[in-house]
Image (cartoon, grey):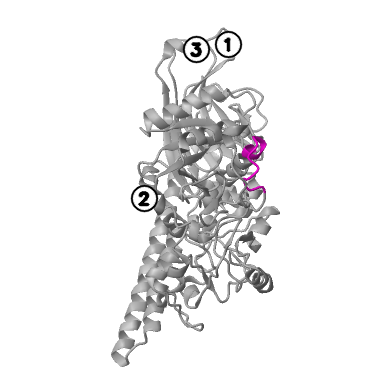
Amino acid sequence: MHATAFRAPYVASAAPRRDDAAPCRAPRAARDGVPRPAADSSSSAAFPAAARRARLICLASRDDTASAPRRWSRGEGGARADAEVLEVTRKRGDCYGCGVALQTDLPSVSGYVPPAEYATKAHHRQLDGMMLCARCSELSHGRMVNAVAGQGGARLQTGLITPAQLREQLSAIREKKALVVKVVDATDFHGSFLNKVRDVVGGNPILLVLTKVDLLPNDTNLEALREWVTHEAVTVRRLTLAGVVCVSARKGLGVKTAVGAMFAERKGRDVYVLGAANVGKSTFIRAALKAMREEGNFGVPAKRLPTASAMPGTTLGVIPLRAFEGKGALYDTPGVFLHHRLNSILSGDDLKRFGLGGSLRRFEPKPRVGDETEDRANGFAGLSLLWGPLLRVDVVAATPDAGLVFFGPKGMRVTVVETESLPDARVLDARASAERERSRASARREAAAAEADADVSRRVAAPSAAAAADAGRAASAAMEDEMLRVPTFEDVCSDDSESDAATSFLTDDDDASFIQRLVREVSVEDEDEDSALDSDDSDSARALRDVSVSGMNGWVRVTRVGNSRGDACAMRMRVLGPRGLEVFDREPMPVT
């Protein structure tokens, strides 16, 4: 590709003013004209709904403004946790790292900058795209600072932005004529694909970029991988694409090819880079801008770029970047928060502790338990494989020639144990469901009691608007708290009749409480018996199916081992994991 393909006249490296980025947020004048509540108002309901849609509002509890995000817990405030909330007053200007509007009130809330620094920048008219908030600074130094409600069970009242607010910022793309660069994680293709992307982008052309291919095994055939992705996206999902490119943003592999495809398809239009949270959108944008500079386009930004980190939900607003000559801009967008992904269920500290998002390691376990030195005659039947503390695979039935291969993070060890030594999968699932129903019933009773108290108050004296708003907000908070909280081991095994095996398994290690319920049951059968042996190597294994774990950046592969020509090969397994997790049964990815 010639250098002239990316050349553009010099432009400022700072992001354009907000007036130039109408799709990002409502015009400044319109937002400033929205009435604000009084400074001592304790009700978020007093702020008009139109204002909440135009302005990215964060709610913060008076008692929690200095505390770190917590996991959902019924015992930490409950319905009264939202009794007093503060509106975070957003000021003019946005953080160039995450795109959120700036504020100078609460250091623990996204967008915070010191008041003195903000005043200095305001005096010199350097607010637009010139300041980095405190959260982005911490993320840049490796800290896992959350800003999205529901991430790892984070409570809404601690100043967090909701996933709905993030999704709402993408609604303008459908009405624009733009090129959409859809970023998908190669290590979590099905979990990060966004099947309903057309609902967001409309009829705009889509260029699919498969990122993080450097995390796959070194001998991966990228051309075969590209063909597999094209088949999954176009043939299986019937999604029309402008092209498919495999890239490694960290190593620069395929980035110039992706940039060339982007310029060829753009045709003077804006380019929006979107995808699920934590798939590498900001990292790809930084690599793409670097590739443009290397090709001679020195006008693209070289500093004050979007923040890239391992924390899901790093980008909180639409960030415009002047990367093209003439009309059009390159936009980084907030990640779509998918509740079924494991990296959305876990907290930032857990993600860092378990090493999710790192290079994949291939591990092929043997059907042996403990100190056994030989494989069992019946294979994996009756055995369970614990994938770290997060996932459990029970092999209900299997033929002797059915094998398993794990592709996952290096820090996630696989342990083979007897299924009989673990708590029954159906018991865990039933008790988790029963506990959830009890929690919902309790929340409904609390809401009914609050409504009854409010009705009594109305009969005695005319209630204030603030009291009515508090009662409704408390009831909603109680319901949402119980529906989204992460249950503990005590919730699952509170019955005294729990077996000793279950208790010993889960109490030896607190991490085991992540395995809470049955996620999916998968049956695999090799129908092509005559092709069981494609080579003369008796130790060769043929891939049958992949069981992909959403958000774990890894999968379990069922294989046919050996040269058992003419014999049926089958396996039936149950996958257990955290509540809300989703598991996909797919054709094997061309990775060995």
Residue 454: percent from the left, percent from the top? 34, 82
Tell me the quarter of the image containing the N terminus.
top right
Q: Main secondary structure of the magenta part?
A: loop
Q: Is residue 260 magenta?
A: no
Distance between the Cα atoms at labels 2 and 3?
57 Å
In the image, what residue occupies the spot 62% across and 58% down? 145
The residue where tag 2 is placed is: 175
Q: Tell me, for residue 49, which label it has, or none.
A: none
Distance between the Cα atoms at labels 2 and 1?
58 Å
Q: Is residue 280 above or below residue 591?
A: below
Q: Which residues are magenta?
A: 291-302
Front position in the image: 4 or 119: 4
| Mark with earlier residue (2, 1) | 2
| Mark with earlier residue (3, 1) | 1
Front position in the image: 65 or 118: 118
Tell whether 537 sits left or right of 81.
right
The residue where tag 1 is placed is: 538
